[in-house]
Amino acid sequence: MKKSNRLTLYIILAMIAGILLGYLIHTQSGPEFIRSFSVNIKLLTTIFLRLVQMIIAPLVFSTLVVGIAKLGDLKTVGRVGGKAMLWFITASLTSLLLGMLLVNLFKPGAGIDLSNADISGAKDLVGKTQEFNIQKFIEHVFPKSVIEAMANNEILQLVIFSIFFGIATAALGEKAKVVVKALDAVAHVILLMVNYVMNFAPLGVFGAIAAVIATKGLEVFVFYGKYLLFFLIGILCLWAVLLFVGFLVLGKRLPELLKRIFPPLIIAFSTTSSEAVFPKLTDELEKFGCKDKIVAFILPLGYSFNLDGSMMYMTFASIAIAQAYGIHLDIGTQLTMLLVLMLTSKGIAGVPRASLVVVTATCAMFNIPPEGIALILPIDHFCDMFRTATNVLGNALATSVVSKWEHSLEPAAAITE
């Protein structure tokens, strides 16, 4: 059995074991033990995520700078970046519109039980809404210190710095070759570290699943089954759209891409962290045949600008909360909300529970009680699993499609492991 297939099997077994252990603890233990167990078992996930986070900043910086430098000139950088942004904006608008369409069709908010509001969790999120104004938004996008951006794993800030650094490196030509060579070596070292870190993935998955099932139990699906079901229908529709467009461009190679990115999808799904799979996704896309310079340029941009699953969930959740409170939003207001979400969602990937923070801020902006976020908190972890996996799929497709458009996608026969 291949190493990647073995890892996938271990991750799936870890998920099953986590569900069984979590359910056993939830049904057989008291509240104090459950709380203690959840905190302690989640340390496994914390270890795995921290191991991944420690390599994200150097990987993004080294690969993005090398990618831009290898593209050669500003004209090529602009052309590739333009194609990427065309995909990102189109995919984001499609995701937002799909969420708006389905939430109006199914009206999941009408079935939310107001008595199940997680008030304590909502207070924490409502407190963060003050961060979202134009000044704070600009400050969050543009770094004042690259060291601070690296320390906090602020992907968008790091991307901004790396783009400037990469363009300057490309402009220097021969003089900068030593810099490009050094950073290329760093990128390869980090990618080798990825293989070591991924060995801890099953433990991280086991801890995350066991903790949430022990705390919430399976009963949460009884109360929120309708909301989750309608959201999953939306995710399936979004996957269908993304995969259809992917098939139009990639043709028969689409199944091969899905097979390549299956392990990253499973890890992202079970840990609810797209950051956790950034290094592994980089490696798999290069093995699929995408040129390293394209992967290095497009993927970090995608992590800031192309969060398809999160985008769909933002309109879905915002309007569902309004429905729960009986607040009518006309189509004009909903389209305005969509444009606001399009803007405020960019550059907040590093914020914990980023989608919910943006939803809370948007609700406040449109006179929807921001405390309403408490209505969907009990089921949010499970929604987050699906939207995170969708974000990973969207970025994998974006990178592969732009590679194909740039004639930089190796044929299957030319790829070596």
Image (cartoon, grey):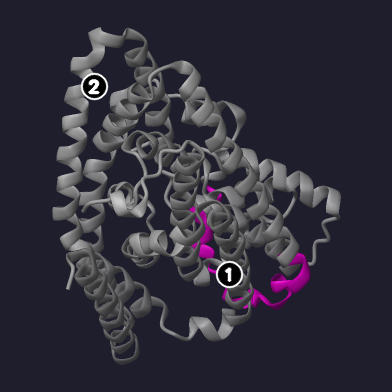
Picture quarter containing residue 5?
bottom left
Position of 380 with respect to 207 (left or right) is right
- Whether 249 is drawn above or below 298: the answer is below
Position of 152 with respect to 110 (left or right) is left
What secondary structure characterizes most of the magenta part?
A: helix
Position of 362 with respect to 416 (left or right) is right
Position of 303 with respect to 341 (left or right) is left
Picture quarter containing residue 328?
bottom right
Query: Where is residue 131 shown, x and y percent of the image?
Result: 53, 37
User: What is the count of numbered marks?
Assistant: 2
Residue at mark 2 = 180
Around disc 2, counting alpha carbons within 10 Å, would you say few (fewer than 14), some (14 to 19), or many (20 or more)?
A: many
Mark found first going from the N terminus, 1 or 2: 2
Around disc 1, counting alpha carbons within 10 Å, would you say few (fewer than 14), some (14 to 19), or many (20 or more)?
A: some
- Whether 37 is drawn above or below 223: the answer is above
Q: Is residue 123 one of those drawn in magenta?
A: yes
Q: Residue at x 29, y 33 (%)?
A: 63
Residue at mark 1 = 236
Figure quadrant of the N terminus:
bottom left
Q: Residue at x 48, y 86 (%)?
A: 219
Query: Where is residue 385 shown, x and y percent of the image?
Result: 44, 66
Q: Residue at x 46, y 24 (%)?
A: 77
Residue type at mark 2?
Val
Q: Quick one: 360 or 71, which is closer to the camera? A: 71
| Residues at discs 1 and 2 in contact (Cβ within 8 Å) | no
Query: Where is residue 208 shown, x and y percent of the image?
Result: 31, 68
Residue 133 visible in the displayed image = yes
Query: Bounds of the magenta span?
Result: 103-127
Q: Residue furthest front?
A: 413
Residue type at mark 1?
Leu
Residues at marks 1 and 2, CA–CA distance in whole angstroms: 42 Å
Q: Quick one: 153 or 370, which is closer to the camera? A: 153
